[in-house]
Amino acid sequence: MEVFGVALSLLVMFSGFGLLIGLLFGFFGMGGSFLVTPALLVMGYKTDVAVASGLAFVFGTSVIATLKHRDLGQVDYKLGVLMIAGTTAGIEVGKIGLHWLQDIGLANTVVSVSYVFLLGAIGVFITYNAVKGGDDDGGVSHDADGDEELDADDIPDIAKKIQSYRVPPMMKLRGGVRVSLWMILSVAFLTGLLSGFLGVGGGFIRMPALFYLIGVPVPVAVGTDLFEIVFSGGIGSFLYAIDGAVDLAIVAPLLAGSALGARMGAAATSLVEESEIKVYFGVMLLLGATAVAVREVGGIVEMPVLDLVSLAIIVGAALLVSGAVVVSSIRELRAEKTRPAAQTAD
Amino acid sequence: MFGIEISQGVVDGATLIGIVLLEAILLYVGYGVLEKLLGPRLTAFLRGD
């Protein structure tokens, strides 16, 4: 059976896959192209179609997730615009570095090793901090207004150090954070540099950078990161669409599923403890690093089956983490119901 | 007319991205209405009320 010339089974599969990705995207502000492009490649789509359709999908999902985070007061537009400016400059410099490595024939090796190392290192760092900090590290309440002042204990040490450099002009951000414009631009430039060098969207670098380096609350970091992805995804997919590489038969059903997932994911950030979000994010990055490493090894030893293993790890990680997010949210909802009674009993 | 030519690829690209944007907004509004209608019931169900 076909709908608009596309097999119904394909539409259902893409919608289901979209739901899963949307949930992660709405919750973490990352993970779109990370999951979609490899899946489309394994399904046999041409590289340009897989990359372009993945980007167009990321654009659509980031629009939906940003709107939802905006409703929750979790998007800092001023920070977003500054991040876009700094990141764009960083990407351009990163691309120059990448071209230089290509000229001397080391691009593939250096990029692959850096990518695995960076994903793994950020994953270990976030998981370690979240586990070490326990509940005390959770800090910010997610249903709190984005403008609510942050407790000094909730700000990571590196962010405190960066905020202490009071080079004018100083910017006031959501969560009562005060930081120098130059520090924001420097962090944005560095994340853009890595993003351009590795050829990735950079959500997995930017979201932790906004929290650990600038010190904005995690939900605001997620919302602002998504706001930035609207622009990077929009421009990227438009450039591919000019060459006709975007396939709407892939993008439309993926988006239909992910729109629902992104709502669920964004709503879950208001329920799940911050320390839990960090653990899930860290685990997702660690499994992502493993998947990329497996794929690279497959390329070196010429074993295409390892591509499938890599995809299985990515999809497995997505299922595991999104399942954990849903279970945590339901658990928190049920805990909310019993909490007033417990307080009364005290 | 003004000596400015826009290639068909650019027009097609812009149209396609416009369609994706429109779909995203429609889905956001549509699911928003559904959430308003069914959200409280679903939340109550998940809470075990």
Image (cartoon, coloured by chain):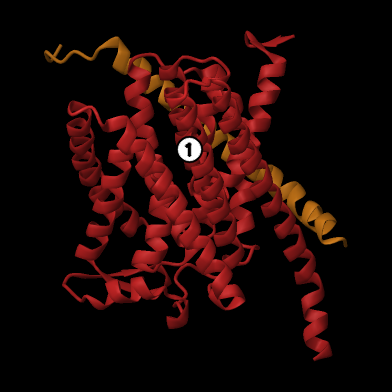
| Horizontal side of residue A81 vs A70, given as left or right | left
Tag count in the figure?
A: 1
The answer to whether residue A64 of the structure is visible from this angle is no
- Chain that the image shows in red: A
What is the x, y in percent for residue A286? 53, 49
Please name the residue that numbered disc 1 is placed on: A293
Considering the numbered disc 1 on the image, is that residue within a helix, a strand or a loop? Answer: helix
User: In which quadrant will I find the C terminus of chain A?
Assistant: bottom right
Quadrant housing residue A171: bottom left
| Horizontal side of residue A26 vs B14, given as left or right | right
Q: At x 49% / y 46%, what residue is drawn?
A: A30
Q: Residue farthest to the left?
A: B3
Front in this rendered view, residue A40 or A329: A40
What is the x, y in percent for residue B35? 69, 47
Circle 1: residue type: Ala
| Horizontal side of residue A158 vs A258, given as left or right | left
Q: Chain of mark 1?
A: A
User: In which quadrant will I find the N terminus of chain A?
Assistant: top right
- Chain that the image shows in orange: B
